[in-house]
Amino acid sequence: MEVWIFILSGVLLLQPALTTPPNIILIFADDLGYGDLGCYGHPTSLTPTLDWMASNGLRFKDFYTTAAVCSPSRASLLTGRYQTRSGVYPGVFYPGSRGGLPLGEVTIAEILQSQGYETAMVGKWHLGSGLNGTFLPTRQGFQNFLGVPYSHDQGPCRTLTCFPPDIKCYGTCDVGEAPLPIFLNEEIVQQPVDFTTLIPMYLEFSKSIIHKAVDNQKPFFLYYAAHHTHYPQFASAKYTGTSVRGRYGDALAEFDGSIGELLEAVRDNGALENTLFFFTSDNGPETMRKERGGSAGHLKCGKSTTYEGGLREPAIAYWQGKIKAGVTSELASILDILPTIAALSGAPLPNVTLDGYDLSDLLLLGHKSPRSTIHYYPPSIDANIGIFALRVGKYKAHFYTQGAFHSETTPDPDCRITALLAVHEPPLLFDLDMDPAENYNLLNRGIPEDLAPVLNEILQVREDFQSSMEYAESQTNLGNDPSLKPCCNPECTPKPSCCQCKNGV
Ligand SMILES: [Ca+2]
């Protein structure tokens, strides 16, 4: 008997298994590009928190989102599935959208809630609200929600203050929509939003969730989907005028500072050694905003394109004492977050087709990534065309290319709206290790003998992927119903401009 006990204890000691499920803080930036952070080489950005997390955690160089616009990438992040499977395509949701992320989809929050986690979200949802709040985060596993059901430019902003004391937002935003609402769970508590106090309010809410969960000895999952770095830029007084990078820099500084406050809150609650922070961004920069937009750095083009600037993103995993500091070129995707979190929390995987891989051995043990491919869908997905581009290992093939309005004003004409849809047969082929900027097409003068097997493999991977993909009914094509636009004062007229409540309903 004593021998068995000895062996059992020995096994337990050898296992790196986690004694308690870890807390998870998942941070999703908006329209933040590959070149925007100090730790990714930006010369003037002030991002001390993320730079610190990067130098004390694992920084990814080859990390990808699944879409170069907001809604589909959020669907993929939360479900571990391509947006085609959930129907969150083409394009994005609007305040009056009839559709949303289907309730049958299983989100990270639902998985963790079933494991006993306290689940919460702050910020930008953008996966639908629907009739009577059908598609709100509270219906998708988030027990606590404070934020906007869509993007913060999807409401008039011309008369709103974006920087104190009274600097108005730059641009008009969507003038025909309802004033931007802030929801607490399923109730509107502010309409229109006060951008100058928004982040302090989010932080107070987030800190109370962290404190409550730790107090109750429950693991927590906090999904912080930031508005910052998406147009229009805004910040509270503490960060206004602090960055030499101007308004974008101020907004980015507040975003980075808010992550610093979450880190402090976790540390103050004694939970740092049991909390995984994961940071990335939903899509590449909106270069059409010029100096008020983000930067893809070395990479080509930005938002809404399938060049690297549209879908390759900064990503950082930080977990004190668990993740070794370093930089990795292993391939990874937002699709991998759900399976990884499921593995770390001990949760069973949902009984659906998943497109992600468990990266826990990469994070905790420094193993290779199980992922070898990246598929690039355009924002305007057409099932007859499918993916625009495909990366297998270090090679990327473009079967179709197209410029985009969101990537306007870059010096590269390929990025602009005037670069119409082009079919490439054979595809354009780039070696992303030697040429990450996609400058030199390896098939420019025919197919060299040594690249023929590479091309054949890529074509086969594409064929296998496309033939097995199942496209769900489009949720964005269900259209809009003006009566679905959120209004804190449903009886008022004329809608939607009358929907204004200073201190909630
Ligand atoms: Ca976005």
Image (cartoon, rainbow, N blue to C red):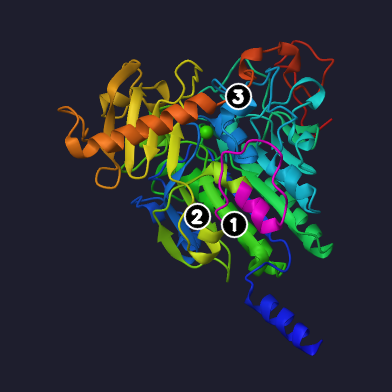
Question: Marks 2 and 1, Cα distance to the nearest angstrom?
Answer: 8 Å
Q: Under 8 Å from ligand 1: the CB of mark 1?
A: no
The reply to whether dot 2 and dot 1 touch (C-beta < 8 Å) is yes
| 425 to the left or right of 101 | left
Answer whether residue 342 is magenta in the image: yes
Local packing at callout 3 (Cα closer than 10 Å; few below 14, some 14-19, many 20+) is: many
Read off the magenta span. 339-359
Camera-nearest residue between 292 and 220: 220
Q: Does residue 133 sit above or below 224 in this rendering?
A: above
Q: Amino acid at mark 2?
A: Ile
Camera-nearest residue between 237 and 36: 36
Helix, strand or loop at mark 3: loop
**Residue 48 x, y percent position in the rendering:** 47, 59
Q: Which residue is mark 3?
A: 154
Residue 63 has which mark? Answer: none
Q: Amino acid at mark 3?
A: Gln
Q: Amino acid at mark 1?
A: Phe
Q: Is residue 438 visible?
A: no
Q: Which residue occupies the extreme bottom position in the image?
A: 2
The reply to whether dot 3 and dot 1 touch (C-beta < 8 Å) is no
Q: Which residue is mark 2?
A: 316
State the quadrant of the N terminus: bottom right
Residue 446 lies in quadrant: top left
**Main SS type for the magenta part?**
loop
**Residue 378 x, y percent position in the rendering:** 45, 25
Camera-nearest residue between 445 and 114: 445
Q: Which residue is mark 1?
A: 277
Question: Marks 3 and 1, Cα distance to the nearest angstrom?
Answer: 29 Å
